[in-house]
Image: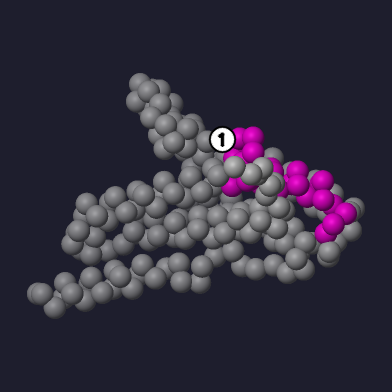
Amino acid sequence: MGTKRPVTFREMLAMLMTHVMYGRAHFAIAKGLIGANKTIIGAAPTFFAITRDAHADLTVLTAARIFDRQRGAVSIHALLSSALKQAGTFKYGTSAEVRKAVEEANVRVKKLEAILAAITTRRNQTMAHMDPSAIVDSEEYLRGGLVSYRQIDGLFDETELILNRFSRLFRGDSIPLYFADADDYKQALYLIAQAQKALQ
């Protein structure tokens, strides 16, 4: 086996931007299925319940990966560290501008600590692992892992701001971090509704 090369800043940035897009898509589908017409959901209740929960879990896992503190992981923290080391190589920003962007990004991440703690609780105790404490003290788990829709939305919004700032400094552009057709699950629900009407 050859020596592993380090992941480049460009690769880290692209991977994290992609993760935000997927995280938002999973979140949109989970929310959409929760609010979907009960008659449509009733056509395949087990399928829809499992699908909804899977997308909800993947929303949390995606957010956890973006902010992973494990050594060597591609994360926001690794990106900021890489930006500092390569500040002089950014084509569309000075070293001072890059350092300032890192400083301000760290402030933004600091403000997300409460929601990140809840996400870590969910990830560590019932997703990546089956922690007995989530069963033995379920009330504490529910309190520690409580995350609202608004917090999830805010987390991805803040992450997009951070990543696109570095995208402008490094690549000279920024892009909306969402899939334009992330709500195409609605078409599937519509077709089920139409089929139900035809059978009546």
Instruction: Specify whether residue 133 is painted magenta.
Output: no
Q: Which residue is identified by label 1?
A: 117
Please give the name of the residue rendered at 48% of the width and 45% of the height, measured from the top-left corner.
61
Please give the name of the residue rendered at 44% of the width and 56% of the height, measured from the top-left corner.
26
Instruction: Give whichever of 2, 198 is nearer the camera.
Output: 2
Percent of width and height locating residue 145:
47, 35
Please give the name of the residue rendered at 9% of the width and 74% of the height, measured from the top-left corner.
200
The three-letter amino acid code for the residue at tag 1 is Ala
User: Left or right of 181: which side holds 164?
Assistant: right
User: Left or right of 6: which side holds 73?
Assistant: left
Task: Please state, as top left, top right, bottom left or bottom right, where the N terminus lies in the image.
Answer: top right
* On screen, residue 139 above or below 96: above
Q: Is residue 5 visible?
A: yes
Label 1 secondary element: helix
Instruction: Give whichever of 183, 151 is nearer the camera.
Output: 183
Percent of width and height locating residue 167:
72, 62
Q: Quadrant of residue 184?
A: bottom left
* On screen, residue 192 above or below 129: below
